[in-house]
Each structure stands twice: as structure tokens, then as C-alpha cells.
Image (tube, rainbow, N blue to C red):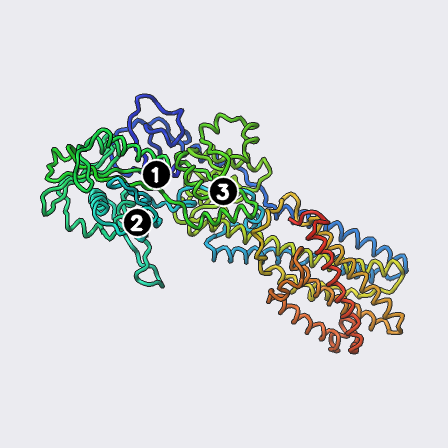
Amino acid sequence: MALTGESVPVDKSVAPVAELDAPLGDRRDMAYKGTVVSYGRGRTVVVATGMKTEFGQIAQFLETVETARTPLQQNLDKVGKILARTAGAIVVVIGALGLLRGLPLLEMFIFGIALAVAVVPEALPAVVTISLAIGVQRMAKRNALVRRLPAVETLGSVTVICSDKTGTLTKDEMTVRKIFVGGTMLTVSGTGYQPTGEFVQDGVAVKPQGLVTTLLRAAVLVSDAQLVGQELEKQDASQRNWSIKVDPTEGALVVAAAKAGLHKPELDVQFPRVGEIPFTSESKRMTTLHASPEGVVAYAKGAPEVILGSCSRLQGEDVVALTSAGREAILDVAHHLAGDALRVLAVAHKPNATLEHAERDMIFLGMLAMIDPPRPEAKVAIESCVRAGIKPIMITGDHPTTAGAVARELGLLTNGRVVTGAQLDALNDLDFAHDLDNIPVYARVSPAHKLRVVTALQENGHVVAMTGDGVNDAPALKKADIGVAMGITGTDVSKEAADMTLTDDNFASIVAAVEEGRGVFENIKKYLMFLLSSNLGEILLLATASTIGWPLPLSAVQILYVNLATDGLPALALAIDPHDPHLMRRPPRDPRRGIFTQPVVTLMMVGGLWSALVNLNLFGWALRSGRHLDQAMTMVLVGLVLTEFFKAYNYRSDRQSVLSHPFANKWLNRAIAWELMLLVGVVYLPFFQGALRTFGLSLVDWMIPTGAALTIFPILELVKWLVRRGWFGATT
């Protein structure tokens, strides 16, 4: 049903009393616009049109839902305002100090512009765009297509993933799990429509034969579904993409038989159908007649109580009379299977049958129990969510028993409870907010319920990702911080409302996208730590020298060279730094805390202060040692640039040691190598010497600033050691 996302058709019939107060999925007497009739016929009375229909109400929800700015956009807005104010203040202060010392106005104006450039991270827009674009590219390789770039980073802040059940946590492919035949229970392995699996009895794999093959053959012959295998490109011809034509419940029977070597096309030729009594919602059964060497045989499948009602005998090693005790025992088994959220079908046959008497005095063969099974990879993904501090929630239109069984199998429902849409309606907003964190599964919900759950989670401070494939999911997809649509089964409406589309409709792909989102944020943080710390070091160096009356250690052109050339490529390389393999073992960051947590600010401040201190002392020593001003300025230029190169490696992580895979970023290695060659050219080539006021240094003059720059390593390593021990608060 399109409005609830159920995986099997819903029977519709006339009810003696109107069911408008029942949940949407339980209104058996109502048909809805936009849904599909799988079979049957009937006459209806139109009770609503336009915006008063269920689809119309969804359209109204979409019009009223407002989307919020992403955490990244909010953080960068704050950074931009802070940097703009800081740049203005510094330019005014340094300019005023220079004028008080009698320096020319034009010279201080040019120097002020250079300082403003030093404060502002010019490459920030490019770095953010590149990081997000690379994140989009990586997500596409992991089956997630992003429609809006900022959504990439928002994924890294996700604290809750609300997922539909059918097709996302499950395969949306009904699969036979249990077979009850001859008084014994067999388990069938394999999931979906792939016709591979084993039949297991008492923990031992057995070859299906005898009563099992008789039951499976009967179930296939009384079904209309066809198993279709499409060869996959670039794979062995034996590997196919299997699908079912017609009904998914009958498809499960056909696949189970194929696992036993019984193929419907061959059986249809061997036992041609000669008569049929079709399924109806009233009869709850289907019967077909087939020609065989022993004569015409009738086969029937349907609800266990209905099929048992037409049986007088029971097939075992021999055909025996079906007693009342035998009926009760079979019904008890059926109820037990149904309690495990399995859909149970009983099968019977009758030799020497006629169309008029086919459904009387039948022989009971057995039962097949099926379910839309959880994806194997979904359970692993949910475990990864829990380790990463992300709460997975199931929101489905399916029956609460089915939803609870699937959730328990996935490890999603370990505590808490299943809440239905009707129970949700009975909760006021205050009680719901109080119980919110103890509800991992919502069942029998409507579009309004989904929207309410997402809104309540956001009001409780969560960053919410919501998945969906139907029109009924569109309002919640639009409201969520990250809306995730299904690419295979998703409707155009859901894809348009979403920020991201999964090409494989798989929950595991959402978790992979969250990992990429976290990596994007980490890389933007690395860039800002590196660049702002470097700029802070330059500003403090110049401001301190100006305050104490020294000559300026760098000229305006040298400042521009350091910022526009030297800082550029290493900063861009940090934007594509490989992700930390432990990224999904950390809790999600709090988007309200922003980029600049206390550990990040401490690392930036220490790096900037130490850079300024070391290079200021280097400048003073060079002047006292008798070196002329241009030589001393060149030594400071070299020392400052090398310090920033070393910091680029340190700032690849705000917690891990620089010695942990120090050269893993090949682009950073190349950027540093190129910039070192450029630095040598700036120092020795006459063209650059004239433009940048540099001086050719001796080997000793290179070794002194290099040694001074290397001191940044132990200083930042000490700070990281303190960060890892929680001296400066949480890093996320």
C-alpha cells in the first residue's frame, strides 16, 4: 500500500461499521487515491477529493514544512563574522601604531591590507567546496547520491537515523523461512529472490525429498508468480539479478521450490493447469486443477484455518484421517509461527478432483511461513550506528508484530517498546518528549505521525536523518535535517523532497554516507586549524615587533607570498586528507558547539603563539648577530614557512600523534615538496629577490630557522597528549 509502505497487498472489503478511527493501514473498507489495485474488482463511493484526500493532506504537509540551515552553514557564518571583525580591529591597531612611530601613511595602508589578507583564510570557499564535492564523489561510489552539497557535512552531525522497514532494513522480497510438513519443522536459509539456500532440520542440512517436495510442488502449481533472472553485466553468466513477476507472497513459494530444484516452468509443462477457483478476500484461498498421469489433481493454498476446514485427511508417511486434536495441533503451530511475525500459508491437495468438488475432502500437506527478511548488511550497519553514538529508529506502516520481530532480529529492539500510530495520538507533546528516547520502533503510522516524530526529535536537540520511498514519506523527508530517498523503489515526490538518494535502497549505505560526512567536517576543521593558527602566528609576530619598536620582520609582499602561495596548496591538501579509520567509533559531534571546541582552539592558539615566539626570537637574534635587515627578514620568512609546513602534518588530527601514519596524505606530501622548491627559488633567484626583498642564505642560515621550526613538533604533541586525556574538554 503506497500510503503505509507495506510489502504485501492489503485486502479490501465492505465493513459493517466505518473504520475511519482505525489507523490508516487497518482501514479495510477504504481505498485511496494513488494506490494500486493488484487484483479484484468492486464498486466504490467517493468520500473525498483534492486536498481532502490522504494524498492531498500530504501535499499540505509539504507546503508547510520549513527546512533549516545546516550546521556547516551556521558555523561558517560565525567564522566569517569573527574573522571580519578581527581583521578590521588588527588593521586599525597596527596601522595606528605605525603612524605613531612616524611611518609613512601609504606604507602603513599597504601593510594594513597585507595584514587583512593574513587574517582572512582566502581559500575557505574553495576548500569547503572541494571537500564537499569530494565527499559527494566518495558517497556516489558507496551508493549515495547527494542533491545538495551542504547535506554532505550535515550527515556527520546525525544523531538519529529514522528508517523505513520495507526495502531499507529489509529486502522487500518475501522469503520462506519455515516449512511445517509431516509433523516436523524445517528452516530454509537464504534471503530474497536468489534461488539458493539450504533446508535444515534439527540443525542439520537435509536434502528436500518426499513430503517436502510434494508440498513445494503443490505450492508452486497453485501460484501464478514467475521467477525471472536477468544476467548481470561483467559477471559470470550464472550470476543473475532475480526478480518476481506478480505477487511477492507467491514469489516466495516459487523461490523456495527452486531452492529444492523444483522450477515452475518445468512443473507447469509437466502438470498443466486445467481449472481454477481464484482467490477472493472472502474465501481467503486459491485452488487450481492440474492434469497428471494419475488423473486431475486439485491443489489449494490459503489461510491455515480455511484450508484445514476443507480437509478431512492428513498426509504423513501414509494418508490418515484428520482428527480434531490434529487440527488443533496444526493451528497451534500456525499461531506460533504467526507470533514470530511470519505470514503462514497452508497447502492441501485432492487426487481425482473435479472443479465442483475440488475444495471438499482434501488432504492437508503442510504449511509454509514467510517474512520480508532483514538485510544481512543492515544488522552490521545498525551495530556500527550504535558504536558511533547514533540511534537507529524504525518507522513503518507495517503491523507492530511484524515490525517488532524484524527490529529484534536486527538488534534494534533490545529495550524500549513498539509504539503504534494510535498510541502516539494518545500521547500529548510533553509525555511524548519524555518517552521519545525509549521508543526505537514506530508501527502502523501515517504521514502525520512520521512528521511528528521527526519534529519531536529535532526539538529534543537531535540531528535527524529520515529515509523513505513513498509519497507518504515526503513531508518527513523534507522536515528532517537529512532526507534520504530510495533510488530503486522511491517515488519522484520522495526523491524531490530528499537531500540524498540511495541507489541500492540499503540502510548500510546511509551509515557509509554518515562516515563520509564526518570525514568532510574533520577535513574542513583541519584546514581551519592549520590556516588560522598560521595566520595567528604571523599577526602576533608582526604586532609584537611593531609594539616593541623593532623593524617589521616581514614586508607586505612577503606576507602576501606566505598567505597566497605557501599556505594555499597545503591547506587544500588537508581538505582531501584520508579519513581516520576510527571515525565511526566516536559519538556524533554536537552541532551547537561548532567547529571551534576548546581542544581545537587550544591547538590553534598554542601553534600560533609558539610560531610567533620562535620566529620573533629568531629575528632578534639575527639582528643582534650582525646580519643586515634583509638577511634577518629572509631567515624569518624561511622559519615561518617551515613552521607552517610542519604544522600542516601536525594538524592532520586534533587528537592523534603526528607519528601515526605521518605521510598518508600523498597530496600534502606533493604540496610541501612543491612549496619547498618554490621557497628555494624565492631565496636564491634574482627575480624573486628583487620582488620579495629576499637574500641568498648560507647553509648555516638555513639550519638555524629549520631547527627553530622543528620545535613545533614536541609542543603540539604535548598539547595533543593533554587533549587525549581530557584536559581541554571533549573534542567532538
Report the amino acid beneath label 2: Phe
Q: Nearer the viewer, residue 697 or 238?
A: 238
Which class describes the residues within 10 Å of circle 2: few (<14), some (14-19), or many (20+)? many
Residue 94 visible within the image: yes
Q: Nearer the viewer, residue 583 or 576?
A: 583
Is 466 rendered above or below residue 335? below
- Earlier in the chain: of badge 1 and badge 3, it is 1
**SS type, badge 1:** loop
Q: Residue tagged by mark 3?
A: 466
Q: Residue tagged by mark 1?
A: 342
Report the amino acid beneath label 1: Leu
Measure how far apart labels 1 and 2 are at the Cα level: 17 Å
Quarter residue 534 falls in: bottom right
Quarter residue 168 falls in: top left
Measure how far apart labels 2 and 3 are at the Cα level: 37 Å
Which is more foreground, mark 1 or mark 3? 1
Is 457 rendered above or below residue 220? above
Which is more foreground, mark 2 or mark 3? 2
Image coordinates for residue 303, horizontal then vertical, percent: 26, 34
Q: Which mark is residue 199?
A: 2
691 left or right of 427? right
Image coordinates for residue 469, horizontal then vertical, percent: 42, 43
Image coordinates for residue 93, horizontal then vertical, percent: 83, 53
Residue 117 visible within the image: no
Image coordinates for residue 473, horizontal then vertical, percent: 45, 39
**SS type, badge 2:** strand
- Earlier in the chain: of badge 2 and badge 3, it is 2
